Amino acid sequence: MNHLPGKKPVSDSLGFSTRAVHAGQVPDATTGSVTPPLHLTSTFLQDGIGGFRSGYEYARAANPTRDALQTQLAALEGGARAYSFASGLAAEDTLLRALLKPGDHILMGNDVYGGTHRLVNRVFVPWGISLSTAEFGDLDAVRAALRPDATKVLWVETPSNPLMKVTDIAALVELGHEVGATVVVDNTFASPYLQQPLSLGADVVVHSTTKYLGGHSDVLGGAVVTSDEEIAERVGFLQFGVGAVSGPLDAWLTTRGIKTLAVRMERHSDNAEAVVAALEGHPKLDAVYYPGLPTHPGHDIAKRQMRRFGGMISLAVKGGPDAARRLAESTSLFLLAESLGGVESLIGYPSEMTHASVRGTALEVPENVVRLSVGIEDADDLVADLLETLDRL
Ligand SMILES: *Cc1c(COP(=O)(O)O)cnc(C)c1O
């Protein structure tokens, strides 16, 4: 059930930014308010029992502000349906409940987001799901790890976190579909502006909209987007039946952020390229991980499946864990914080921050790695901040 407001639908043939600004964004019928109102309500007046206006009954089932966001998300990923949730992990949890039952197997890349691994490993595995991970850059390893009758989900994340590994979505889709698995792509790092997995054959896209889609570090959220009607129906039922929905204010903020996604992603990419150009070959660094570098092992695939290379960079620091920690703790513009994808630049130390939950597993992150989420400030200032901090190490 998706209550589309009764206005000319935003056509798929329109450009990305036009869809980002207009999809789901119908001016208010009563006042003409150009920005659709924020519907802070839990319930809706009925004109007689069962007499719903525009189908709205109770806000866990549907709220116009959430519908506006869902329409916008579907339009950007080129999917038929989108469902928004209170967080990225709430979206993943709901999707996995829709796709898996006890006895099923899920295969994930060996560098997926730590929280995704923790969700499956600590919540789904005890419920009878089996989990394995493989190096998704090695298609033979993926083929060997798929279990023809049991693997129901192939979970792909590219570029990955924090080492920016790039995997070939179309090739993995082919392998997954050969054994009847549903292929899910976590598109959080790229955002739909840079990469559209459904167009490469993936069945479902998930997002932490907390990151680039929201884009301003002011709201948590998650999304599931698909064109598979059966999956959509199950996810839609669980969104209502389990209830991890996004609240109206969260949905409204996310929608506002999405309208500028394209311009932000261009700027994030410009700034990241400037940072990479300044840091590559720096004497205090062992490596710069960025898919835009021609020497990056996934560069050719990234060039094929992404519009640009985005704003995420990781650095391997020469002095080991101590130097990496000092770098993360000493920049001034790059703020030491979890998360990514906001307008402000952030720096993090994955092995003890974002990836603390995967220490001791196959997903463990090297202790000399520092991760940058390059914001939309002036590139010169960002470069100067990093170079000055490296000099002082
Ligand atoms: C942050 C993140 C998530 C989890 O999303 P939350 O909104 O924090 O629940 C999932 N996948 C990736 C790639 C992420 O970066």
Image: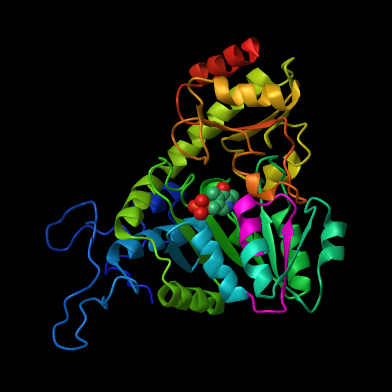
Q: Using the image as rendered, state which of residue 177 and residue 244 is in the foreground.
A: 244
Taking the image as drawn, is residue 12 in sight? no
Q: Nearer the viewer, residue 108 or 126?
A: 126
Q: Quadrant of residue 244?
A: bottom left
Residue 342, can we see it? Answer: yes
Residue 367 picture location, percent across and down:
72, 34
Measuring 14% from the left and 87% from the top, which residue is drawn there? 48
Vertical position of residue 372 compared to residue 36: above or below: above
Decide whether residue 362 is among the magenta residues: no
Indicate whether 274 appears above or below 111. above
Magenta residue span: 100-120
| Rendering colour mode | rainbow
Residue 286 in the figure: left or right of residue 120 = right
User: In the figure, 327 relative to 108: above or below?
Assistant: above
* Residue visible at 56% across and 24% down in the picture: 329
- Report x, y in % for residue 238: 47, 75
What residue do we see at 34% from left, 48% from top?
Answer: 256
State which quarter of the image contains the C terminus. Answer: top right
Quarter in which the N terminus is drawn: bottom left
Task: Looking at the picture, tell me which residue is in the foreground, 95 or 189.
Answer: 95
The answer to which image quadrant residue 249 occupies is bottom left
Q: Is residue 212 above or below residue 103?
A: above
Spot the residue most to the bottom: 49
